[in-house]
Amino acid sequence: MAVWGFVLIVWTITSWRQLFVGHAVLADQKLVTKGAYGVVRHPVYLAALLIWCGLSLCFLSAEAAIVTSLYVLPAYLLYIRSEEMMMLDFFGDEYRRYRQQVPMLLPRLRRALP
């Protein structure tokens, strides 16, 4: 699970090479909707959660599982909520359409065509 989280982080970085640490929208930033961002709107947070969960399982650590469920997950959800509002303010209808098409954290399972 943690390995999948790392793979997702690498895919996220290759999907948006200008990825930065911080809570802001760059002045010339375009809405990224391809690559990992075409699967979920917040792939870095999903990757981090996979890593936290994977480490909890790998080490069979109840403490890490408790920290993940009672601190990390709620903190990420609050941060995501704030980012969503920021993105709506900056990108408006473009982001609203993106939100309708791409789930926040959990990828949609696509039904196979016959």
Image (cartoon, rainbow, N blue to C red):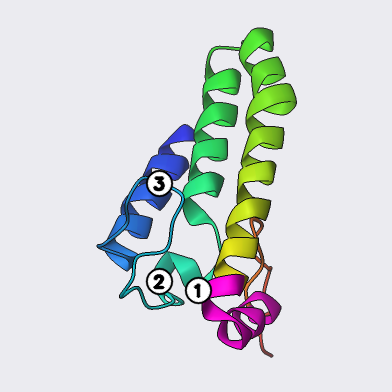
* x and y percentages locating residue 60 in the rendered image: 61, 12
Q: Position of residue 31 (x, y in %)?
A: 44, 77
User: Please, what is the three-letter code of the amino acid marked with disc 2?
Assistant: Gly
Q: Residue at x 66, y 75 (%)?
A: 99
Tag 1 and tag 3, C-beta contact below 8 Å: no
The reply to whether the C-beta atoms of the residues labelled 2 and 1 are less than 8 Å apart is yes
Q: Main secondary structure of the magenta part?
A: helix
Secondary structure under tag 1 reads helix
Q: Amino acid at mark 3?
A: Gly
Q: Nearer the viewer, residue 67 or 58?
A: 67
Q: Earlier in the sequence, mark 2 or mark 3?
A: 3
User: Pointer 2: residues within 10 angstroms few (<14), some, or many (20+)?
Assistant: some
Whether 4 is among the magenta residues is no
Mark before the other along the chain sequence, 1 or 3: 3
* Amino acid on which disc 1 is placed: Gly
Numbered range of the magenta stretch:
89-101
Other-residue count near label 1 (Cα within 10 Å), few / some / many at <14 / 14–19 / ≥20: some
Give the CA distance from mark 2 to mark 1.
Answer: 5 Å
Q: Which of the labelled discs sits on residue 35, or is there none? A: 2
Q: Position of residue 32 (x, y in %)?
A: 42, 74
Residue 38, label in figure? 1
Q: Is residue 56 above or below residue 6?
A: above
> Image check: 3 left or right of 89?
left
Residue position marked by numbered label 3 in the rendering: 22
